[in-house]
Amino acid sequence: MLEQLADVHPDHWTQPFWEAAARHELVCQRCSQCGTMRMPPTPFCWNCRSKECEYPVLPGTGVVFSYSTTYFTASKASVPEDQLPYTVLIVDLDGAPGCRLIGAMVPADTDPPEIGQAVRVAWEDTAAGGALPRFERV
Amino acid sequence: MSAAAPRVAVAGVARTPFYRRGQSDPQSRVEMACGAILAALDDAGLSADDLEGFVHMSGGMDSALLAQVLGVPDVKFSVTLTGGGGASAGTLGVAAAAIQSGQARVVVVVRAMKQGVVHFGAAFAPGMKREVAPEADFYSTAGLISPGQMFALIARRHMHKYGVRREDFGAIAVAFRQHAQTRPDALRKTPLTLDDYLATPLLADPLCRHDFCLENDVALAVVLVAEDLAADRPHSPVWVAAAEHGGAGRWGQGEEWMGMPEEIFDTAGHRTIARRVYAKTGLGPKDIDVALIYDNFTSNVLLQLEDYGFADVGGGGELVSSGAISWPNGSIPVNTHGGQLSEGFSSGISHVIEGVEQLRGTAINQVAGAEVALVTGGAAAIPTSAAILTK
C-alpha cells in the first residue's frame, strides 16, 4: 500500500532504524548516557543532550494512542484514489517509554481499532529492498 | 512589553478580496501583496515613503522585491518569523520589537498566497517540503501528507480522553458559518446546520470538510507605528498590549512528530504562550471581549479555547456547544469574521485585521463595547503565537 510514499531518506541517526526495518526488526534509539528513549532518532538526546546512543530491538508490539481513517487524498500523485480509505495509527511502543511510532494499519480494509487496543508491527517490504512498519491487530 | 517600553499601535489594515483558489489570476502574488501594503498604509494615513520595515512569516515574500516595486526610500528592518500560520499573531511582536528598539518607526506585516499555485492541503506531500527531512519519513510513509490528517489524530485522542464529540466540532463550524453570512466576500456562505454537518462525509475521521479551513488566494497587510506617530491617524490606535510567539520545545513540530508528552499532546501547543500574554498584560480570559482564534481546523479552535483558559482541559466541547462562541449573544464571541473555515484562509492575518476592526468599533459583526481582543496563531509546529490588542 501507499507505494508512492515508500521512499525513505535516512541520515546517520535514522539509518539504523531503516537497516533494522529491512531485517524486520523494530528498534528505537536509546541514550547511552541517561537511558532516555526517543523516536524518531535524532542527533542529540533531548533530556541530557548526549550524542552517544544505541538502538535496542523492541518487542514490536504496542498500544494504540490515536487513530484516523483517511477518505480523501490531498495529492493524487502521492496517494492515488485507489489507495483509499486507509487508517493511520499512532502507537505507544512497548519496551520504549515515551516513544511513539506512526504507521498505517494492515490489511487496509480492516476496521479501525479502539484507542488502548494492542497492535503489533507488520513489516511491508518495499521495491527498494527496505521495509516499512505497518500495524496489525494482535 | 514592559511598562516602561513605548507603546506600539496598529494604525492601518487592509486585504484584497478572498478569491477562490486560482481566481486571483492574472494578478501576481507581488501585485497582490503590494496592493495590500499600499491600502494598509493609506488606511493609516501614510505612504510607502514612510515605510521602514517588513515582517513576514515563513513561506512569505522577499522584502527586496516588494521594496523595489514600491520604491521604499530606506528599508531599516526586514525579518521573517519562522513558522507558518502559527506565527501570525507573533509577527506583531516582531514589528513591535523593531519599533521599540528604534530600528524602524513604520513596519508592515505582509502575507500573500495564491493556492492555485501552492496548495497548503498537501503541505506534507513529498516535494512540498523545502528540504528532505529524515524525520518526515516517520509520518509520510504512513500516508500522512495533509495537515487535516494529522490534526484528526490529535482530535480523536481528545475525544477519547475527554468525551469531546463531533457535535462539538460541528458547533464551531456552524457558529463561524453564521458569522460569515454578513461578510461580503466570504467564500463559504451556504447556511450550515449541525444536521448538515453530521451528514457530511468524513475526510479524515473525525473531521469532515466543514472542519477544514479553506484554500484560496489573498493578500493582507497590517501597519504598525511608534506611539508618537499613532495619535494623528485616520483611525483611533489599537495597541499591541502583548504579542508572544514560541512554545514548548517538546511540542516542537507538533502534528509532524506526535511524540509530545501526554500533558502537551492534550493541548494546541499554546499553554506557555497563554501564560505569557496574560502575565504581560495582567489580563485573563474573563477580560477578553472577542477572541480571534486560529482556525486551520475546528478541533484546534476547541483546544486553544482550553489553552487560553476559556474552559478547563476537556471542557472545550461543552463551551462551544453552549453557544458561548456565537456572535452577538455568546459570552465570548469567537471569529466574528467567519474565520478561515468560512470567510477565507489568511495564515491568520485576517484574525489580526478583525481584532483591529473590533476595537476600532467598525467591525461588520461588531461586539458591543469591545475593548480587549485576543488573536492567536497555530496550532501548528512552533512557533505558535498570540497577541492581546487593546483600545
Image (cartoon, helix red, strand yellow):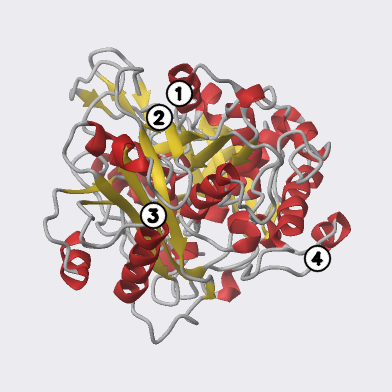
Please tell me which of labels 2 and 1 falls first in the chain.
2
> In the image as oriented, which residue stretches furthest toward the top?
A34
Q: Which residue is mark 2?
A: B247
Q: Chain of mark 2?
A: B
Find residue A68 and report its horizontal and vertical position in percent: 63, 49
Disc 4 to disc 2, C-alpha distance: 36 Å
**Residue at mark 4 shares a chain with residue at mark 1:** yes
> What residue is at 64 percent from the left and 29 percent from the top?
B306
Q: Specify few, some or many for label 4: CA neighbours under 10 Å numbering under 14, 14-19, or 20 or more.
A: few
Please tell me which of labels 3 and 2 falls first in the chain.
3
Please tell me which of labels 4 and 1 falls first in the chain.
4
Q: Which residue is mark 1?
A: B272
Q: Which residue is mark 3?
A: B44
Q: Chain of mark 4?
A: B
Find residue B139 and report its horizontal and vertical position in percent: 43, 50
Disc 2 to disc 1, C-alpha distance: 6 Å
Of the two numbered discs 3 and 2 in the rendering, the one whose residue sits closer to the viewer: 3
Q: Are marks 2 and 1 in contact (CB under 8 Å)?
A: yes
